[in-house]
Amino acid sequence: MLPLLEGILVPHVTPFREDESVNDEALGELVEYFIFSGVSGLVTLGSNGEFPYLSREERLHVIKTVLESVNGRVPVIAGTAYPSTKETVEFSWEAWDLGVDALLIAPPFYFKPSPREIYHHYSRIAESVDAPIVLYNVPKFTGYNIPLDVIQALAEEHSNIIAIKDSSGEVSRIAELVRRLGDEVSVLAGTGDMIFPALSLGAQGAVVAIANVAPRMCVELYRAFTENQLERARKLQLKLNLLNEVLVKSHNQLSAIKEAMRLLGLEVGYPRSPTLPLSEEEFLEVERVLTFSFNKPRPF
């Protein structure tokens, strides 16, 4: 079983070419960039990987490409969620057979399930797939939080549930997760503005969109915290908050994150339709925040 997850894991984007096909070469280069930046692992086909827009074959192809590029250097966690339990179980087995280290599973979406249905969904997956599982609470995209009681019950009854990525952005919820789950399950902040607060409460790390744009800054924050350089960690968090506010909260994060990465010299293309590129005004705001955040006249 994979040890408790910790540190900064990047939920990386999926690069596309102009025809919206997956850009394998760019994906391999991204892997090198993130590993060189010091991240503790890669999360493939998370929200920023645009998994709902990819076919089953494309998802498998992306996972294979990432695994080949990583070559065992850091853990790879693959997003395997589908709206139905059956499809999630089947695809989770396919991803696990490819050699990923763990599975990231968002709750059912489109139809809103009851707490009993959420519990049954995850229980069936945990019982059916002999792989480490990371629960993914992402109310921004599903429209609801996984109830805390459900998470606690799942963690107590299924030893292969090893972590939860919580993207609620709620300090009180992170605190309650840490209190309830103790040292048995990693609590990972899921929003860029919550890294320092979550670590302060006892979380083990973070899986944040902003790590696509500022992986080294995120890693430096984590290291500063673990080395008890709290004032440095606090200042880095405030820098990340500005980036997160513009790139994740103010605009469509799929477009804004990729726009920022392109400005920094990373070949990632644009999001897949129906997501549109940023408007000129939005683009200029992204350009300004990058210039300010990286303390250079023009870092890209």
Image (tube, helix red, strand yellow):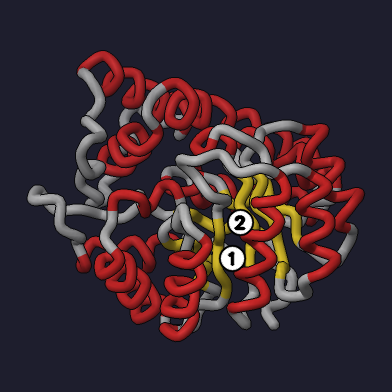
What percent of the width, then of the height, locates residue 158?
A: 77, 71
Viewer-nearest residue: 198 or 139:
139
Left or right: 58 in relation to 157: left
Left or right: 31 in relation to 223: left
Q: Is residue 58 visible?
A: yes
In which quarter of the view is residue 282 placed? top left
Q: Is residue 222 visible?
A: no
What percent of the width, then of the height, locates residue 182?
A: 89, 58
Residue under label 2: 8
Query: Which residue is pictured at 41% across the width and 83% down the height?
Result: 98
What percent of the width, then of the height, locates residue 58?
A: 26, 65
Give the structural element (helix, strand or loop) at label 2: strand
Viewer-nearest residue: 75 or 146:
146
Viewer-nearest residue: 21 or 80:
80
Q: Quadrant of the N terminus?
A: bottom right
Query: Which residue is pictured at 48% across the width and 57% down the height?
Result: 84
- Dot 1: within a 10 Å radius of its alpha carbon, few (fewer than 14), some, or many (20 or more) residues? many
In which quarter of the view is residue 217 placed? top right
Q: Tags 2 and 1 in contact by the CB under 8 Å rule?
A: yes
Query: Which residue is pictured at 82% across the width and 69% down the height?
Result: 157
Residue that extends furthest to the left in the rendered view of this protein = 19
Q: Which mark is residue 235?
A: none
In which quarter of the view is residue 110 placed? top left
Left or right: 151 in relation to 141: right
Query: Which residue is pictured at 57% across the width and 72% down the height?
Result: 102
Residue that extends furthest to the top in the rendered view of this protein = 281
Q: Is residue 143 above or below residue 40?
A: above
- Dot 2: within a 10 Å radius of its alpha carbon, few (fewer than 14), some, or many (20 or more) residues? many
Q: Which mark is residue 40?
A: 1
What percent of the width, then of the height, locates residue 90?
A: 45, 74
Q: CA distance from mark 2 to mark 1?
A: 5 Å
